[in-house]
Image (cartoon, grey):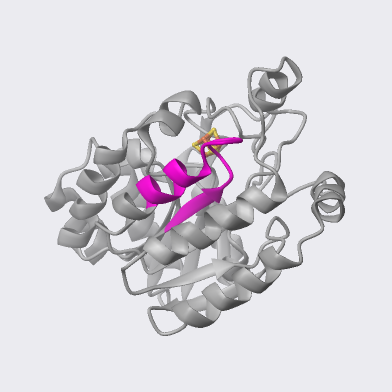
Amino acid sequence: MHFTGQVWRPPFEAHNALLQVTSGCAHHKCRFCSLYHGTAFRVSPMSEVEEDLQELSRTHPNARRVFLTGANPMALSQDKLAAIARKIKAYLPGVESIGGFARIADLKSKTVEDLRELHALGFDGVHFGTETGDDETLAYMNKGNTAAEIIEQLHKLDEAGIRYNIVFMNGLAGEGNSERHALNSARIFNQVNPDSVNIVALTIFPESELCVDMLAGLYQPAGELEKLIELKTFIENLTIATRINANTVSNTAPFVADLPKDKQAVLSALRQTIDRIDESELAAYRQSIRSL
Ligand code: SF4
């Protein structure tokens, strides 16, 4: 298989066949990000994709889902994505869905008709690192989209029938900004229809620009107590029916919940955690995290 640099996928994609169609990130400018460090964005030639599919047809003949690797394979042209989907079906006829990471900006060049075609070819369950619905934070972090664009572009997926998952990056707005971050994110996320909202708590790694900002005194990270209060405010204000996955190494109070059914139980557990938090212990834990 042709895998270049670091390969990332959500934990719940662990059992699916991985296929490299891009490597690195076409954007590579988000301030907090340390993923794909040192890996230039590259589109895999179709010959490479086909060689890997031949291999997958031997190693994963019964694969039901293929996860396209790279930060944003959805940046590929409509024709290329459609051609990849057709090749996948040819080599792995049991595949029912094709997913991968995507940026909100990747959807701008695609019409609802394009997306319907991709859905018919198997695209479903796409993961967006939305991180926040707060415009100030989106701009400072260089995400390359506004909060209004999150709604506008994800609604195109709703129309096309493609399901999706989004991310809330807990603590991203920094010290003193948590309430605004939580309320604006809940307000924006309440207007879309994600299968899941995945909570990742901000952990600043040395490779990120945010680390440089922090060391220069330009960015003050939220403490662990502030992060947990922010998370509680976010959940309190989230009114959509969705799955919450807050169970990565970055989450100091891990849980998985279905909203609205589990909302009160989650809030009650978060309140208890907040009441007995040991800030220095959690800060030490955060510092010990080497990779997401
Ligand atoms: S957060 Fe995602 S879109 Fe932003 S630089 Fe990192 S990989 Fe690229």
Q: Residue furthest top?
A: 216
Horizontal side of residue 284 vs 51, given as left or right = right
User: In x, y percent, where is residue 6?
Assistant: 69, 43
User: Quadrant location of residue 221?
Assistant: top right
Horizontal side of residue 117 vs 83, given as left or right = left
* Foreground of the two, 112 or 279: 279
User: In x, y percent, where is residue 268?
Assistant: 57, 77
* Foreground of the two, 125 or 30: 30
- Could you tell me which residue is drawn at 66 percent across and 29 percent down? 220
Horizontal side of residue 256 vs 281, given as left or right = left
User: Quadrant location of residue 205?
Assistant: top right
Q: Is 114 inside the magenta-drawn segment?
A: no
Residue 61 seen from this side: no
Q: Residue furthest left?
A: 113
* 245 to 202, vertically: above or below: below
* 254 to 157, vertically: above or below: below
Horizontal side of residue 228 vs 186, given as left or right = right
- Could you tell me which residue is drawn at 68 percent across and 60 percent down? 251
* 118 to 33, vertically: above or below: below
User: In x, y percent, where is residue 214?
Assistant: 70, 23
In the image, which residues are magenta? 166-185
* Foreground of the two, 20 or 156: 156
- Could you tell me which residue is drawn at 18 percent across and 49 percent down? 114
Residue 31 seen from this side: yes
Q: Residue furthest front?
A: 275
User: Quadrant location of residue 61?
Assistant: bottom right
User: In x, y percent, where is residue 9?
Assistant: 59, 56
Q: Is 184 inside the magenta-drawn segment?
A: yes
* Foreground of the two, 42 or 179: 179
- Could you tell me which residue is drawn at 84 percent across and 44 percent down? 287
